[in-house]
Image: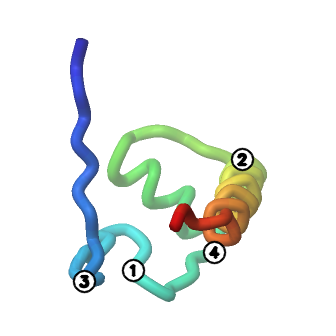
Amino acid sequence: MWEIEVPRDRDGSFEPVIVKKHQRRQTGEISAYFVQIFGAQVSKETISSVADKVSEEMATWSNRPLKG
C-alpha cells in the first residue's frame, strides 16, 4: 500500500502555477488552460460546477471545529 505525505504550508510559501493566490479566472480561461496543458476539452459548465463544489468544501473545512 502506498502512503502519500502531504506537505504542510504553514508559512504560506506555496505558489500555485495555473491560478495564482487571490487571483480569479474566468471559466473560458480555465477551459483554455485545460486544452493547453492537458489536451482535454472541459466545458465552462463543468468548470463552474467543480468550482462551486470546491468552494462549498473549502467553506466547510475552514469552518470546522478545531481540536484543542
Alpha-carbon neighbours of circle 2 within 10 Å: few (<14), some, or many (≥20)?
Answer: few
* Left or right, 59 with reference to 7: right
Q: Give the foreground label among 4 and 1.
A: 1
Alpha-carbon neighbours of circle 3 within 10 Å: few (<14), some, or many (≥20)?
Answer: few
Q: Give the foreground label among 1 and 2.
A: 1
At label 3, which amino acid type do we have? Asp
12, 66: nearer the viewer:
66
Q: Earlier in the sequence, mark 4 or mark 2?
A: 4
Q: Earlier in the sequence, mark 3 or mark 2?
A: 3
Label 4 secondary element: loop
43, 9: nearer the viewer:
9
Q: Which mark is residue 56?
A: none
Residue 24 vs 2, above or below: the answer is: below
Q: Earlier in the sequence, mark 3 or mark 4?
A: 3
Residue identifier under label 4? 26
Location of residue 25 by image quarter: bottom right
Label 3 secondary element: loop
Label 2 secondary element: helix
Mark 3 near mark 4, Cβ–Cβ under 8 Å? no
Q: Which mark is residue 11?
A: 3
Q: Give the foreground label among 3 and 2.
A: 3
Residue at point 27%, 71% (across, down): 9
57, 40: nearer the viewer:
57
